[in-house]
Image: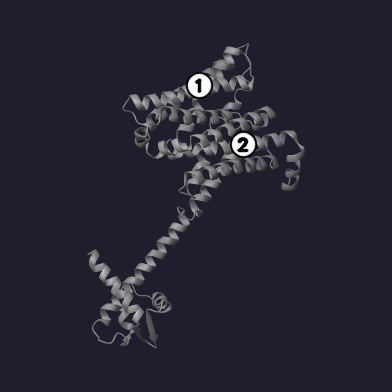
Amino acid sequence: MGIIEYIELVFSDYTLRTITLGTAVLGAVTGMLGSFAVLRKQSLLGDAISHAALPGIALAFLFTGAKDSNVLLIGALISGLIGAFWIRGITTKTHLKADTALGLILSLFFGFGILLLTFIQKRPDANQAGLDKYLFGQAATLVESDVWLMAFVAGLCVLVLLFFWKEFKILLFDKDYAQTLGFNTKFIDALITSFIVLAIVLGLQTVGVILMSAMLLAPAAAARQWTNSLGVMVFLAAVFGASAGVFGTAISATQNNLSTGPVIVLVASVFVLFSFVFSPSRGLLFKRIRLIRNRNDLELQKTLTFMYHIVQDHEDISHPHAIKILNNFRGYSRKGLKKLIDKNYVKVEGEMWSLTEEGFLRASNLYNQNEKDD
């Protein structure tokens, strides 16, 4: 299937349109909320909560005997919330750090969930078919009601973020200061954690328990590379998440035998890799460019200072000196000399050089600055 045919099908095919809209909305809401998890240094939170939701799905099936998505997701939501607040309780009431608590809850709940799924699978009166989609995700099972539910949660998430923006921001960067201002930090923390759990539970059907944490973290990690502003980061994370959902669905639909969930995660990972390399402020490429530029500037300054020491021996700063004298200086290069000429710091005639008044003043300032630093 070509890209043109795919675009036409998005508007005409119910299933494809539903999956595309669902993954886009899911990516946007998980990207927004994932920004707070990343900045709070709780990168494992999404992984722990998604795994903690698994026993809730299994128990909901055992208690009701139905494989209704809404019932199973309610079970997942309750289980995920229990796991999230257990993590919070462990970190606040014990000496264990957050990463230890996250790892404990992840292992405990996921192990219990796998045990329940195995039990269900071996029951003669129960059919486990359909429950395994929550492990690996199955975007094709999305229906219009699922998309409306995601859209409702996304809209509610935006309203809550706007209403509590100041509180979230202060809590994120200075919890102690938020307490001194009289904010109920426990309520604010519980509120944002609950929304993160809700977003993760909504994505289990699409991406699955195993990969859901990537949907929460990857868009936020990519957005973090481009800005220092929380508002811009949340917006970019939503854009990256929605784009990953749309492009991942498109790739999956146009190729054979490619699961939608894993492809979406891979596309989100490409956004992260691109951001790590090409973002102007933190990208590896531009860091390398700045490093080389700073190194070259330092070599120029050293060369200019070396010339200043030579010129100081003469009353006339325009007195010419042989270029070969510079060969004894380790930082000298023909390329560097050309840059000094371009900056009008040095004049060269034949194989002789001399400092200009501008170059002498600049070199004098550098020398005096170095003397102060020493």
| Amino acid found under the numbered disc labelled 2 | Val
Which callout, 2 or 1, points to the residue nearer the camera? Answer: 2
* x and y percentages locating residue 138 in the rendered image: 63, 30
Report the residue at 40% width, 31% height from top.
183
> Badge 1 local density, few (<14 within 10 Å), some, or many (20+)?
many
Residue at point 43%, 59% (across, down): 288
The image's mark for residue 25 is: 2
Question: Helix, strand or loop at disc 2?
Answer: helix
Going 41% across and 63% down the picture, which residue do you hit? 292
Crowd class of label 2 (few under 14; some 14 to 19; many from 20; radius 10 Å): many
Q: Which residue is mark 1?
A: 79
In the figure, residue 291 lies in which quadrant? bottom left
Residue 25 visible: yes
Is residue 214 at least partly visible in the picture? Answer: no
Left/right of residue 172 with respect to residue 236 in the rendered view: left
Quadrant containing the N terminus is: top right
Residue 32, horizontal then vertical, whole percent: 53, 38
Q: Secondary structure at mark 1?
A: helix
x, y percent for residue 99: 39, 32
- As displayed, is residue 335 above or below residue 13? below
Q: In the rendered structure, which disc, 2 or 1, sits on the residue that comes first in sequence?
A: 2
- Say what amino acid the circle numbered 1 marks: Ser
Q: Quadrant of the C terminus?
A: bottom left
- Quarter assignment of residue 123: top right
**Residue 122 sits above or below residue 189 on the image:** above
Q: How was the colour assigned to the protein in this rendering?
A: one colour
